[in-house]
Image (spheres, rainbow, N blue to C red):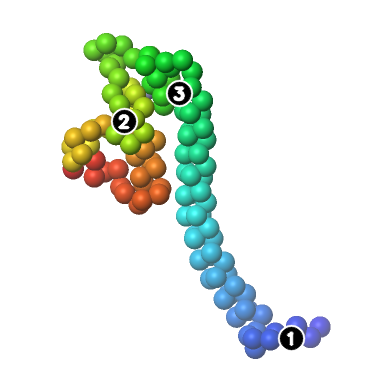
Amino acid sequence: MGRKLDLSGLTDNEAEHVLKVVQRDMKLRKKEEDRLSEMKQELAEEGSRCSILSKQHRFNEHCCIRCCSPFTFLVNPKRPCLDCQYNVCKTCRTYSKREKAWLCTVCQKTRLVYYGLNPVYLTG
Ligand SMILES: [Zn+2]
Ligand SMILES: [Zn+2]
């Protein structure tokens, strides 16, 4: 049967090609947006989780706010995070030489997602 009338004057093949290019571009952009919003979602969940935990009586005095592992003198000493001020264990923090302070994994992610700061600079 006859070809469908296309307002842009493109043939079906051309229109399809253009559409594919646009879709691929949109998909890539969408993927990046999805990744970011996924990370933001995770951060929001982590935020509400740790605000509940921090309300528990002295929870953060004895346990890491991020992974809940107990602090032990010398073996796994607690250190406060520069950004969130919660105590975190040795596996949940990185030392920022530049800031001369500890930063927890979640705050590193927050900096990356919201401020575009690469955590790599911490060790520089
Ligand atoms: Zn931890
Ligand atoms: Zn933190």
Q: Which quadrant of the figure has residue 6?
A: bottom right
Going 58% across and 75% down the picture, which residue do you hit? 17
Query: In the shown orientation, is residue 98 left or right of residue 68?
Result: left
Q: CA distance from mark 1 to mark 3?
A: 64 Å
- Mark nearer the viewer, 2 or 1: 2
Q: Nearer the viewer, residue 114 or 2?
A: 114
In the rendered image, the vertical position of residue 53 relative to residue 105, given as above or below: above
Query: In the shown orientation, is residue 56 left or right of residue 112?
Result: right
Badge 2, how many Cα within 10 Å: few under 14, some, many 20+? many
Badge 1, how many Cα within 10 Å: few under 14, some, many 20+? few
- Residue 75: x and y, percent? 26, 13
Badge number at residue 54: 3
In the rendered image, the vertical position of residue 41 relative to residue 9, given as above or below: above
Under tag 2, what secondary structure? Answer: loop
- Residue located farthest toward the right when viewing the structure as drawn: 1
- Residue 25: x and y, percent? 51, 66
Q: Are marks 2 and 1 in contact (CB under 8 Å)?
A: no
Q: CA distance from mark 2 to mark 1?
A: 63 Å
Going 37% across and 16% down the picture, which residue do you hit? 61
Mark positioned earlier in the residue sequence (1 or 3): 1
- Mark nearer the viewer, 1 or 3: 3
Residue matched to label 2: 81
Residue matched to label 1: 5
